[in-house]
Amino acid sequence: MKAVILAGGLGTRLSEETHSRPKPMVEIGGKPILWHIMKIFDSYGINEFIVCCGYKGFFIKEYFKNYHLRNTDVTFDLKNNSSKILTNTQENWSVTCVDTGENTLTGGRLKRIKGFLDPEESFLFTYGDGVGDINIKNLLEFHKSHGKLATVTAVNPPGRFGILKISENNNVSQFNEKPDIGNAWINGGFFVLQPSVIDYISGDKISWEEEPLQQITRDNQLSAYKHEGFWQPMDTIAEKKYLEKLYVSNKAPWRMWD
């Protein structure tokens, strides 16, 4: 199974960090938040990734191109122009970085990677700026159990987010991205999708959270996996510092790896 990660936005609310690099490359504990998200999936055996690049996407490609230099001990023999890896800390990952356009919206980015997906296999899909102690195994089992086209992980953090209206049998009956009401279950990313959902997206200028998800909801094809544990986006410097504090103090709930 593949995991698709959105990594192309401008990250304007984190401009102090993103003026020189894409938002998913902003570091938590010395590692890009993109790496943290991938490690969450890897903890459950998901190691094939498609990264939807856009703004400053070269930084993401360069990171994985030189991953071994960043994460291992190396001896350089300058006289003979050679090098030797002394430790092997490589991840068992396949990472496909796809240029999905600098100004493409979230739905358009997903549509652009359709050709990299198995048309017969469901896939995971999330944002490149949020972490949580999501039980991916349970999420996948839940998705298989209801037989719908899409599952969204619903979380319940503080306000300022859009809400999901969820029925007693976990069907989503309303999807509003920016309503003017208080706390409720919200879109926490970590979707499981059938490839046919991409047919709901008409082009680059379509936001996944608007027309496609709202139509999928009207078609009664969206269910919510309720996650009551930790979940946190990184939209602001304050949130970045909060995640950093948790990680460096060994209190990061999303760190489910050794």
Image: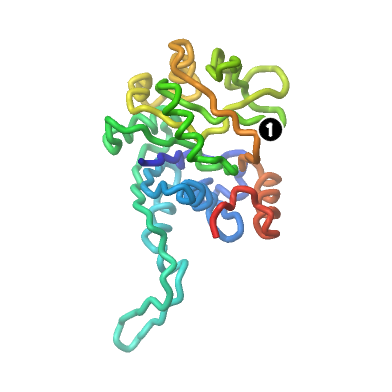
Tell me where residue 120 sits by quadrant.
top left
Amino acid type, mark 1 = Pro
| The N terminus - image quarter | top left
Q: Residue placed at 73% from the left, 21% from the top?
A: 182
Q: Residue 30's spot in the image, x, y percent?
A: 58, 61
Whether residue 208 is situated above or below residue 18 in the rendered picture: above
Q: Dot 1: few (<14), some (14–19), or many (≥20) neighbours within 10 Å?
A: some
Front-most of residues 169 and 34: 169
Tell me where residue 198 sits by quadrant.
top left
Q: Which residue is mark 1?
A: 157
Front-most of residues 103 and 184: 184
Q: Residue placed at 60% from the left, 44% from the top?
A: 15
Q: Residue placed at 41% from the left, 32% from the top?
A: 104
Q: Seen in the image, is 229 located left or right of residue 209? A: right
Q: Secondary structure at mark 1?
A: loop
Q: Residue 148's spot in the image, x, y percent?
A: 42, 20
How many marks are shown on the rendered structure?
1
Front-most of residues 229 and 113: 229
- Residue 64: tell me if it is visible: yes
